Image (cartoon, rainbow, N blue to C red):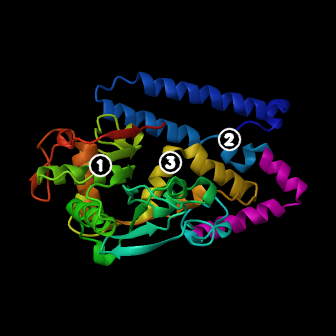
Amino acid sequence: RFNAPEWAESPVFDYVRQAYLLNAGFLRQVADEMPIADGRAKSRMQFLTRQYIDALAPTNFAATNPEFIKAAVETKGESISQGIRNLMADLEKGRISMTDDSAFEVGRNLGVSPGAVIFENELMQLIQYSPLTEKVAQVPLLIVPPCINKFYIMDLQPENSLVRFAVEQGNTVFLVSWKNAGANESKFGWDDYLEKGPLAALEVVRSVTRVKKPNVLGFCVGGTILSSALAVAKARGEDPVASLTLMTTLLDFADAGELGCLVDEASVAAREAAIGKGGLLKGQELANVFSFLRANDLVWQYVVGNYLKGKKPQAFDLLYWNSDSTNLPGPFLTWYLRNMYLENNLRVPGRLKMLGHKVDLGKVDVPAYLLAAR
């Protein structure tokens, strides 16, 4: 943030920097020492304080950003004109540009591992990828990604594609691609995502490969959906998988991070009233929430770069995917928020009923690998 030499060399800008850092430290200390007994409420206070501090950084304003002034002088005002053009373009798109959107296209340089859609229903398509080895493992792999973004997070570019890596190791890979919910999907709930998602995909994988128990991998909320589906299968007396891998998946929401502090009874009740019986949460709204969890990296950095300096963001495949958000059905979202984030019911055996069965994750007895990340 304060890397430019002017922040140290200029007495004026050095004063602005020091005053900001001093006040930021004071506000953080006040938020940390606030006598709030409710842990969720205190976390919310700390989160909002950080948002306030980040938003008021002197780098975010033209008059107090020496790099803005330097660029404007060196370009004879062209950086200001380009910044305004960037702002107008982003206002038209409805989001802040984090990457060069023209550098990527799904099917051209993203999601290019060879494969084909072999099944689809109202909520998802199932992709089977072509083998890249002479011999393949007998047991296939089914991957269930999160439904809050597009499938190609698992298949970005060839050099950083999990799908391609798995296929190169001799695996027969199947991948669920969740549909972007529209009006026809606006009444689907959690049970629909289980039945029409991993449970339907497992049936197809078994039919195609004639292997009774494939390996399965779930990522993020895709892992929560997959684990719930396996708990339903167990309640039905079935053991449908050989192994389970979960990547950054929450099953116990007792410590759900900063996202959890934003979920309370009032906010969930408001969502339930608005879209709980039908409706959509727009993908961009959800994307904005995730961006502000790391506001300096995913919001203010681009406000300064795009609008104050008039620069074009660099091409970055992961940020292109991050900006390619999807809509969610209201009944699915509100059930998930209440039963997972707010009440943490999944961890309690028998408390939740899914597809007509009380579920108990503790009874899902398969070899499991769990990957957590910061």
Can residue 269 be seen here? The reply is: no
In the image, what residue occupies the spot 34% across and 42% down? 250
Of labels 3 and 2, earlier in sequence is 2
Sequence-first tag of 1 and 2: 2
Residue drawn at x 67%, y 70% as measured from the top left: 102
Question: Could you tell me the amino acid type at mark 1?
Answer: Ala
Residue depth check, mark 1 versus mark 2: number of the one nearer the observer: 1
Q: Residues within 10 Å of mark 1 (few under 14, many from 20)?
A: some
Residue, disc 3: 292
Q: Magenta segment, which residues?
A: 67-91
Q: Nearer the viewer, mark 1 or mark 3?
A: 1
In the rendered image, the vertical position of residue 133 relative to residue 40, given as above or below: below
User: Which of the pair 14/207 is nearer the observer?
Assistant: 207
Q: Is residue 84 left or right of residue 79?
A: left
- The quarter of the image holding the N terminus is top right
- Residue 140 screen position, x and y as percent: 38, 57
Tell me: 197 left or right of 156: left
Residue 347, position as x, y percentages in the image? 21, 39
Residue assigned mark 1? 242
Q: Position of residue 311 (x, y in %)?
A: 75, 58
Real-space Cα separation, disc 1 to disc 2, in angstroms: 55 Å
Magenta region, mostly helix, strand or loop?
A: helix
Residue at the bottom extreme, as displayed: 184
